[in-house]
Image (cartoon, rainbow, N blue to C red):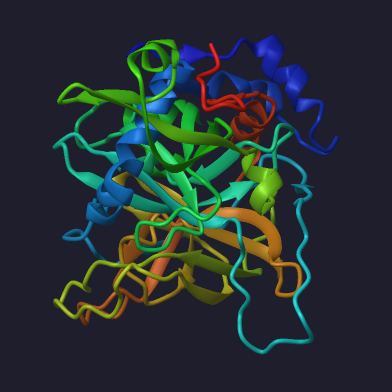
Amino acid sequence: MKRIFLPISGAVAATGLLMSGLVGSAQAADDVATDPMANNTKEAASVASFWAASNGAALRAASAYYWDANEVKKVVSKGGYSPDGRPGVTAPTGSEKSGGRAQNVNLPKTIGKVFFVDAGGKFRWCSATSIQANYRNLVATAGHCVYDTDGNRAVMDNWVFVPGYYQGKAPWGIYVGKQAFTHYDFDVYEDYDRDYAFVTVYNGIAFDGVKQVDRKDYERFVGPKWSRDGHFYIALSKDAGRLGDNVGGQGFAWNQATGKTVRAFGYPAAPHPDGHKAYTGVTPKTCYGPTTAKAVGASWLKIEEHIGLKCAVTPGYDGGPWLLNYSNAKRLGYVNGVTSTFADQDGNDRIDMITSPYFDGETAAVYNAAKNVASGKIVGPNGELYK
């Protein structure tokens, strides 16, 4: 699939919505690449139906994307950072009150799993979050959870986001990916210093069961449908609304100082390198602490400028957000990283650190391009597909 580049003029105009302190955005615009996912409502409905069929059987059959499970090594310090501009933020939306001063961590409604089919035809998932966008329709995750580095394809097949996912259930609907925004260096060179992605999604689609109809109604209906043994069926689907309206959206921060405290979220599932399996991938877990003050490098993945966080989670956590200034009461913060790699710093075959790309002005350019793109609905009020 040929890469489509945003024209510099459009990216520069979009950058005007960022804080005026962003420096070097025009130059970074050249590095924004985008790929189509589900091109139209018919494709989107087919993708949603694929995952929702048989009461979510495909969702339950999916496993964590263990892209680097056998490549857990020690990462090394590479020195300090040089931000490419002044720090900036985009505020979150959808604040949610929680009772009192809870000591336990209140999990954000924005987190969930992205599901897709990899190059080998296997059903996979990663962690992700809803993030603030002008059209309330954006998901943030790792680049390797969107772009297929193993199969060298443009994007994963049948890509969807399910916030609040739990054992085959989609409480706020299934959100089909429409367009993926990534950094050119990751897409083309698999440069993991740019291992992040922002995906616009259609309005959520919810399935309320199946209805048997006569041939006339079957032929008239333009939504998901099938016939069997002379009987005709249509899927009772409905529009679940925009992602950000349903679960809110985390803020976004770039060019921040390292060493700040973040709270990371995700769904760890893989065993540690020594075979110990501490997590199931069923429920989200969280880590809390300061990021490394110096850049982290891993030569085998072309990494020179990651940030690290002490955290003993395992793959499946990939793509989960690192939230700066997380409010336990509002369940909101600012996405300032996404889990990219896993490291064993003390050599005991147990993961004890995770890393993320450093979010700079080029990251902001990719995010800003994505946040200004609309998606639209998949189904109408009677379950019909929008054309």
Residue found 35% across the figure and 43% down from its top: 52
Quadrant position of the N terminus in the picture? top left
Q: Residue 366 vs residue 26: left or right? A: left
Q: Nearer the viewer, residue 171 or 130?
A: 171
Identify the residue at image location x=27%, y=46%: 54
Residue 383 position within the rendered picture, expressed as x and y whole percent measured from the top left: 52, 27
Of the pair 28 and 208, the residue shown nearer to us: 208
Residue drawn at x 27%, y 56% is 60
Q: Position of residue 197 (x, y in %)?
A: 49, 38
Q: Where 385 falls versus 304 (above or below)?
A: above
Residue lying at 65% horizontally and 53% vertically, measured from the top left: 247
Q: Is residue 131 visible?
A: yes
Q: Is residue 385 left or right of residue 243?
A: left
| Residue 10 drawn at (x, y percent) | 69, 13
**Residue that lies at the very extreme toward the bottom in this rendered image:** 103
Let me know if residue 306 appears in the view: no
Q: Quadrant of residue 339?
A: bottom left
x, y (%) of residue 34?
49, 22
